[in-house]
Image (cartoon, rainbow, N blue to C red):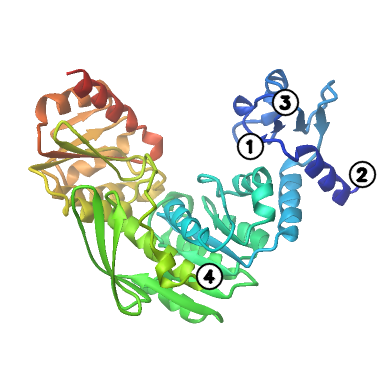
Amino acid sequence: MNSNEAVEEFLRLTENRKISVDSREINEGDVFLALRGERIDGNDFVLDALNRGAAFVFTSRKFNDRRAIYCQDIKELLIKASRSLLARANFDKLVTITGSNGKTTTKEIAAFLLSKIGRTFKTEGNLNTEIGLPLSLLNGRREFLFARFGVFELGTNNKGDLEKLVSLLEPQICVLLNVGSAHLGNFGNPEDLLKEKLSIFNSRRITTAITNGDDTRIREFVRNLECEKYFFGTGRCDFTLVDFSYDDRNTKVHFVSGGDKFVRLNGLWSAGQIMDFGAAYLVAKNCGLDEPALDISGLSLSFNDRFKVEKLHGMTLISDFYNSSLESWRSAVDSIKKIESKRKIAVVGSILEQGIHSGSTHMELGKILGAFDEVLFFNVDRDIEMACGTVKPVLISEDEGVLASWLKENTKKGDLIFFKASRGVFLERVFGKFMELIKDG
């Protein structure tokens, strides 16, 4: 069987079936891909997938089971199959979005707006890698093949990741939200990280670049592109954020785009999320939406781990566990300053993936934390302790129960408590324990 025949057979066998690379997610009739990674070999879980009822398993080992199909390079087969599907799609516009922060939020808003004028496909969740994106395509092929618009979130952890995804998708509209310090440790220096993010504009079919006008590095690069350019930011841009404020349950935004405009967003949005709205707004306008259709009053952000605001016992609780960087911290603090409260308390964990820059990153974080009345450190990862040079926490502990108990005994009505750390710190354990204590007490 040649390469093209193998791809067609793969597409036939997986049609109308869920594909997964995690055997724990396999249900009756699903397909398991036994990918080999740096730390885990999927071939070790083939029997588990079969026992769970997998219809087929693609594996690079020989198994005595007719459902186990041998494939020497499963990753290559996955990419070729997604490329074959892309060749059959008929998008009016294909949009790709990347950045250090805000990718998923921007994707969700853009897809919400575009769905008003045509069938829209969006990548699932945060499946934005060389493996995750093809899986999202294959699992959503029914919607994907008949969509008018495609909105794709692209992630990168290492040099060259974005180039591969851009080469696969060949987007017309390319969006770069920001270039911060997230994953800096994987790139060695800020210049290489910037170069990686800018590679989103290397699509041979690019017609439109949409990016952050407040970052002079990005703006100068984009000016030399042979395509239409649109900018969002707080300075002179195509979408200029003038101001925002909060009432009890909504965010009121004043921006300029061809004149003064005012929108009310459901829920409390952070400054960073409002900028994500600005990027999505420009995407929608460039896809043909007129001004009335750009209303997003029906949209509510539902990302549980991204600046989620809750009210309980007269306190304001904000959880932000999904991502952490100096840039996202500054954005969050700018927003928190606008929320009325008697005291502001931060429960903080490390910013991960900083490599040799971890010391300077956490020293700078300590300065940012000066905006809070009280600070607690969850030091299950010790890097956060480096911030002690610039801020003095009232408590440092790796025990979620100790931190939660302090919060229960020392917080009261009118306080605002902000929980933030990188995903790998699992700060949600502290939040969960605190919620248990105050609900029971």
Indicate the amino acid at tag 3.
Ala
Counting other residues with Cα less than 10 Å from the Cα at mark 2, is it few (<14), some (14-19), or many (20 or more)?
A: few
Mark 2 or 4: in front is 4
Using the image, determine if residue 169 lies above or below residue 44: below
**Residue 403 badge:** none
Quadrant position of residue 50: top right
Residue at label 3?
Answer: 54
Q: Residue at x 39, y 43 (%)?
A: 303
368 with respect to 171 (left or right): left
Can residue 399 be seen in this snapshot?
A: no
81 with respect to 167 (left or right): right
Mark 4 or 1: in front is 4
Indicate the amino acid at tag 4.
Cys
Residue at label 4?
Answer: 287
Q: Report the Cα–Cα distance between label 4 and label 1.
A: 38 Å
Q: Of the residues under marks 1 and 3, which one precedes in the sequence?
A: 1
Q: Report the Cα–Cα distance between label 3 and label 2.
A: 23 Å
